[in-house]
């Protein structure tokens, strides 16, 4: 399953990068970040499945590191002009840009939580790893609630 997830991640990253490289500008950025958000959901789901199956945290090193990298990249994927005006459907609320400091603070919390999850994946404390997954999930929601239209 890990190979399929890795292949899916790489494939969607290439699609998002290719869209932007073709000169689609803000529309390409929106498509790339949407692909990344979907992939972060896949990684979170795989991590949760491993926790539920009582697998060692080390089985989730790749997914945890990928999630941490993604979390650090999130703020840069919301440049000015990449909202509804980009011409493609987006769930990003205007508050991302009007409350940039709040958005970046929540994104930093998410990145810190994901970094800690990746650190714990290198160890063998399954209880701490599972608890940190819950922290990461909460930090996702803390950003989605004010900045994502459902």
Image: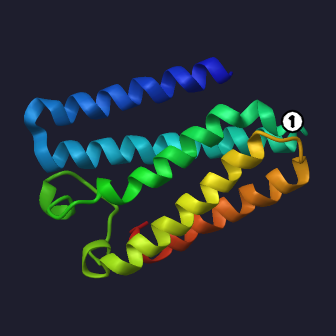
Relative vertical location of residue 17 with respect to residue 134 in this rendering, above or below: above
Which residue is under mark 1? 56
Where is residue 63? Give x, y as percent: 63, 36
- Quarter of the image for residue 15 reads top left
Residue drawn 28% across and 59% down?
78
The number of callouts visible is 1
Assign the N terminus to one quadrant of the image. Answer: top right
Question: Is residue 72 left or right of 112 when viewed as pictured?
Answer: left
Of residues 113 and 37, the one drawn nearer to the viewer in this rendering: 113
Up/down of 80 relative to 16, above or below: below
x and y, in percent, of residue 106 in the image: 48, 72
Residue 98 lies left or right of residue 66; in this view the side is left
Judge from the rendering whether residue 130 lies leftward or rightward of residue 62; answer left or right.
Answer: right
Q: Pinpoint residue 138: horizontal percent, then vertical percent.
A: 64, 67
Residue at image coords 69%, 51%: 117
Q: Residue furthest left?
A: 23
In the foreground, 150 or 11: 11
What residue do we see at 49% from left, 74% from top? 145
Q: Is residue 77 above or below residue 20?
A: below
SS category of the residue bearing label 1: loop
Quadrant (top left, top right, bottom left, bottom right) of the C terminus: bottom left
Res 86 quadrant in image: bottom left
Alpha-carbon neighbours of circle 1 within 10 Å: few (<14), some, or many (≥20)? some
Q: Report the side of 59 relative to 30 (left or right).
A: right
> Residue 85: x and y, percent?
13, 62
Res 144 seen here: no
């Amino acid at each position: 399953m890990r190979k399929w997830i890795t292949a899916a991640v790489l494939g969607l990253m290439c699609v998002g990068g290719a869209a932007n490289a073709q000169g689609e500008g803000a529309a390409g950025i929106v498509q790339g970040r949407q692909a990344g958000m979907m992939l972060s959901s896949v990684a979170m789901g795989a991590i949760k499945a491993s926790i539920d199956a009582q697998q060692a945290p080390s089985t989730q090193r790749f997914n945890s590191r990928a999630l941490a990298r993604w979390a650090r990249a999130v703020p840069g994927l919301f440049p000015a002009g990449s909202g509804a005006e980009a011409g493609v459907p987006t769930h990003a609320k205007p508050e991302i840009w009007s409350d940039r400091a709040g958005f970046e603070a929540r994104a930093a919390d998410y990145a810190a939580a994901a970094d800690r999850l990746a650190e714990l994946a290198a160890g063998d404390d399954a209880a701490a790893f599972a608890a940190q997954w819950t922290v990461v999930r909460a930090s996702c929601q803390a950003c989605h609630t004010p900045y994502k239209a459902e």
